Amino acid sequence: MTATAVDVVERYEPVIGLETHVELGTNTKMWCGCATVFGAEPNTQVCPVCLGLPGSLPVVNGAAVEATIRIGLALNCSIATWCRFARKNYFYPDMPKNYQISQYDEPICVDGYLDVDVDGEIVRVEIERVHMEEDTGKTLHVGGSTGRIHGATHSLVDYNRAGIPLVEIVTKPVTGTGARAPQVARAYVTALRDVIRGLDVSDVRMEQGSMRCDVNTSLNRPGDPWGTRTETKNVNSLRSVERAVRSEMIRQAGVLDAGGKITQETRHFHEDTGESTPGRSKEEATDYRYFPEPDLVPLAPDPAWVEELRKTLPEPPAERRKRIQQAWGVSDHDWASVVNAGAVELISSTIEAGASPEAARKWWMGELARRANETGTELDALPITPAQVAGVQALVDAGRINDKLARQVLDGVLAGEGSPEEVVAARGLEVVSDTGALGAAVDEAIAANPDVAEKVRSGKVAAAGALVGAVMKTTKGQADAKTVRELILERLGAS
């Protein structure tokens, strides 16, 4: 198998396309009044409409229509003055009606684009369409070791998710990216997530399934027509989007190099191996037998209303980047690192919660990024909020803890032990600055290090650092370093 994406593009040109599904954060489902609370008991948020029972009729969720239009506007799309829904017919246990209400040839938003930052260079990804549909139920395979259907003894279906408002954002084919195709794919999904989060229409949490990405990949030799594409389904993290594109480029190149042909199919990406396995032969649109939805009238958004919605959009990404870079004082290189880590919104929210830009960047790009890498998760999937990170920094600023103790406070918050204040109290982590309490530890350090103490007495004040370190070790990092240093210099008659 070819080793890297760089090797692949010496012989082939990659073409990628991304289909991203976003669950809208509406209070009720797309066609009925059922709740949309994540994690509720299975099959407790259902009714005749979302279960597809005979005689039930759908009613369009107006909030979902509004949210979809705002997404389209934020992605520079044209908003249709007339559109309609269509039935997408297929049979699967998680689809109770045996069809999905979607949009086909008359979507609500078309012809947009999103400019994304890839290592300091702006790449324009063109958007083909943004359309509304409903989510499916969730199938749980029981009895196997992998949670997949292979090896399972039986399967269960939770229909709580069936009928939740879903927006699908489909890109046009992305070409000319070469070996950077995997990074472009990740940068696009990252930027799209940030745009939608800024609109406050979805929490776009990939680990919870409220944002899912299907990745289309094909290869062709320079000058040849585009190759046969495959679709890697339901990729559920930013890191996996990049890995899925890279893996599929390498796999397809290996097949083509051996004289084989690429099969048009869906594939399943495996987080543990970083590779994909075949799913099913890829269907064409005709296989779904689309036809206009007879139970819903067409939609005709009022252009004046659309313009009012345009006024509610947050500032454009390029302007926001310029403003934030100036406010944070970060270079283009540092900005690219923040974007690639998916930390822009996290840092912004931490600053809004009271931390300085420097402190917010330090925690998210340092300690917390390290922990995310160690656990193989995205930064925003860590069980800590920007407000809690700001709370940790507030304790540091108040002198109640130091940076070393702050890391232990982060441990406690990440472990679910409560707020930063509660973790400090429960673990007894507050800095000790009382001179009486520190005196014994200072005397012990001086007695144990007579040579160092003599250097300090003779005027080599810098040597006091070793004694401060000894006291910090004795107190397990809880001593106030400034107070300790003052006590040492006082006892040794130095200044």
Image (cartoon, rainbow, N blue to C red):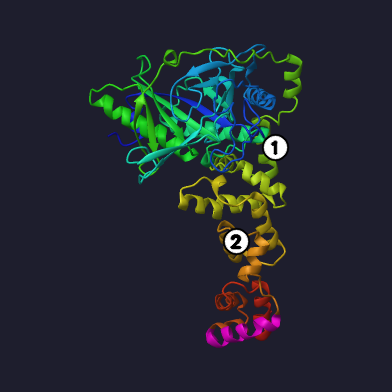
**Residue 102, x across and y down, in percent:** 55, 20
Task: Judge the density around disc 1: few (<14), some (14-19), many (≥20) Cα neighbours within 10 Å.
Answer: few
What residue lies at 72% left-to-right and 19% top-to-bottom?
306
Rendered image: mark on residue 417: 2
Q: Is 437 covered by the magenta stretch?
A: yes
Q: Quadrant of the N terminus?
A: top left
Q: Which residues are the magenta region?
A: 435-451
Q: Is residue 147 above or below residue 90?
A: below
In the image, taking residue 219 as reference, residue 88 lies left or right, namely right
Distance Cα–Cα, label 1 vs label 2: 36 Å
Any part of residue 458 in sight: no
**Residue 78, x across and y down, in percent:** 64, 16
User: How many discs appear?
Assistant: 2
N-terminal label among 1 and 2? 1
Any part of residue 207 in sight: yes
Name which quarter of the figure residue 312 lies in.
top right
Name the main secondary structure of what is drawn in magenta: helix
In-front residue for pair 363/98: 98
**Residue 282, x across and y down, in percent:** 38, 21
**Residue 225, x across and y down, in percent:** 37, 14
For the residue labelled by badge 2, is the local secondary structure a helix, a strand or a loop? loop
Which amino acid type corresponds to the residue marked 1 in the rendered image? Arg
Q: Is residue 263 above or below residue 238?
A: above
Residue assigned mark 1: 323
Q: Is residue 495 above or below residue 288?
A: below
Which amino acid type corresponds to the residue marked 2 in the rendered image? Glu
